[in-house]
Image (spheres, rainbow, N blue to C red):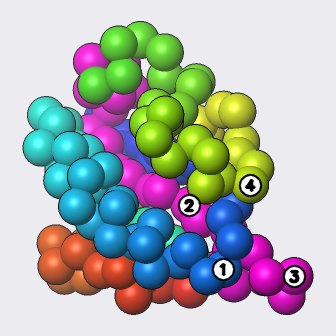
Amino acid sequence: MKKVLRAWTFWIRSHLKEECGAYLDQFVLPELRRQPGNLRAAPLFRDLTDGTTQVVVASIWESMEHIRAYDGGSSAGPTLDPAIRAKILDRDTMVRHYVLDSIDDPALAMLAADELNAGSTGSTNA
């Protein structure tokens, strides 16, 4: 069975990058990693030139069935904590899913298992 990459993108002010990374490391990533069928999860940060940072929460799953079990069947919409909603400048309204031919796909090198398992507020700038 082919694996699925789940990605959700949002934008924050760059000065909130460390706070955002700490929040994701403390609350979001452990919750994702505990889910049956989740293989990896990591935040990716890209500093833009306008004082904002693009954040992608990426996770790899065994199947869409596992994703549906995690999100209650609303696999197209992100789960967003109301407490952080005010700190987000903009966000994709949909979560994107990509079927992977192989978990060893070179395009996934940024999601190396050793980096993900350690958790990282200094996450990869993509």
In the rendered structure, which disc, 4 or 1, sits on the residue that comes first in sequence?
A: 1
Instruction: Pick the quarter of the image with the C terminus.
Output: bottom right
Residue at the spot 71% in from the left edge and 42% down from the top edge: 92
Q: Which residue is identified by label 2?
A: 56
Where does the image place residue 59, in percent across and percent down from the top left? 38, 52
Residue 2 horizontal side relative to residue 94, left or right: left
- 3D distance between C-alphas at marks 4 and 3: 12 Å
**From the viewer's perspective, is residue 10 above or below residue 61?**
below
Task: Please tell me whether residue 68 belongs to the stretch shown in magenta.
Answer: yes
Name the kind of residue labelled 1 in the image. Answer: Ser
- Residue placed under numbered mark 4 in the picture: 89
Q: Residues within 10 Å of mark 4 (few under 14, many from 20)?
A: few
In space, the residues marked 2 and 4 are separated at their CA atoms by 14 Å
SS of the residue at dot 2?
Answer: strand
Q: Identify the disc placed on residue 50.
A: 3
Q: Residue at x 35, y 80 (%)?
A: 121
Report helix, strand or loop for mark 1: helix
Q: Nearer the viewer, mark 3 or mark 2?
A: 3
- First in residue order: circle 1 vs circle 2: 1
Crowd class of label 3 (few under 14; some 14 to 19; many from 20; radius 10 Å): few
- In this view, 34 is above or below 120: above
Q: Earlier in the sequence, mark 4 or mark 3?
A: 3
